[in-house]
Structures are given as structure tokens and as C-alpha cells.
Amino acid sequence: MAAGVQDRNERAVEYLHLLRTLALELEKAMKAIVQNCQPEFEDSVSNQQMLSSRLRVLADELCVPLEAGNSAPRTPRDDDRMREIVDATEALQKLNRRYAALLKYSSRSVALMVSLFASLNGQFPEASGSRPKYQTWSCRM
């Protein structure tokens, strides 16, 4: 009985550690994007994939209830750990939203730059007609 509870506690501690590590990886990826450092970004994405896979496995394992005879009463320490996991999850969700926004706007910026430099002389095709065609350079952020 105690072995099952102890194993579950160890998995919960590992889960919490992985949540915090994943948050650090998101920060690392955002920093790499800002600094335009592709190798560091790719390394972080790879680490994020590994961490996410392990988190998924641990979450599945932790969702399985202990056998009826192996359940132990909850302790204040269990409640504290659960609160830490909830807090870490909320922090990770906030970071994930920032990360998604950064990726979205970075992608949009790249698309704008591609559009700007699509023409070697800086002119874009305009509607046909007698009005003059002006060289235009613009970027909206």
C-alpha cells in the first residue's frame, strides 16, 4: 500500500518539476525568437517536445486511481503539492499564450517582410488604369 502511494508522490513531484522545466523552455524559446537565434530555438523546441511527451505519460499515470485497498488519507503536504501543480499549470498556460502570440506575430512579420521584398525593385503590382504607380515600402506592426 505504502509503495503505491510513495510511487504516486514521486510521480507528482516529477510532474511538478517537468511543468517548471517546460516553463523555462518556453522562456528560452521566446528569448531565442527575439534574438533571432535559430539553433537555440530549435534546441528549445526539441526539449519542449520531450518534456511534453513525458508530462503526457505522467498525467495518464497520475489519473489512474489507486486500488481501493491501497488508498491512503490525504495529507496537508499532498494538498500543498497539488496547489503547486495547479499554480505551475496556470503559469505555464499564461506563458503558452504569450508564446503563441509571439509566434503568431513573428510569423506575420516574416510574411510582411517577404511581401516587402517580393519585388526586387520595391514595386507591387497595382490595379490597371491610368494612374501612376508609386514605389511603396510599408510595414505594419
Image (tube, rainbow, N blue to C red):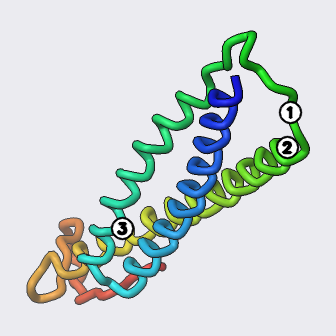
Give the camera-side residue of 101 and 127: 101
Q: Which residue is mark 2?
A: 79
Work out whether 2 lies above or below 13.
above
Splitting the image into 4 quarters, where does residue 31 fall?
A: bottom left
- Between discs 3 and 1, the one toward the N terminus: 3
The amino acid type of the residue labelled 2 equals: Asp
Work out whether 58 lies above or below 13.
above
Q: Nearer the viewer, mark 3 or mark 1?
A: 1
Asked if disc 3 and disc 1 are in contact, CB closer than 8 Å, the reply is no
Q: Which residue is mark 1?
A: 74
- Between discs 1 and 2, the one toward the N terminus: 1
The amino acid type of the residue labelled 1 equals: Arg
Question: x, y percentage for residue 61?
Answer: 54, 29
Image mark for residue 44 = 3
Q: Left or right of 113: which side holds 6?
A: right
Within 10 Å of disc 2 (Cα), the crowding (few <14, some 14-19, many 20+) is: few
Q: Nearer the viewer, mark 1 or mark 2?
A: 1
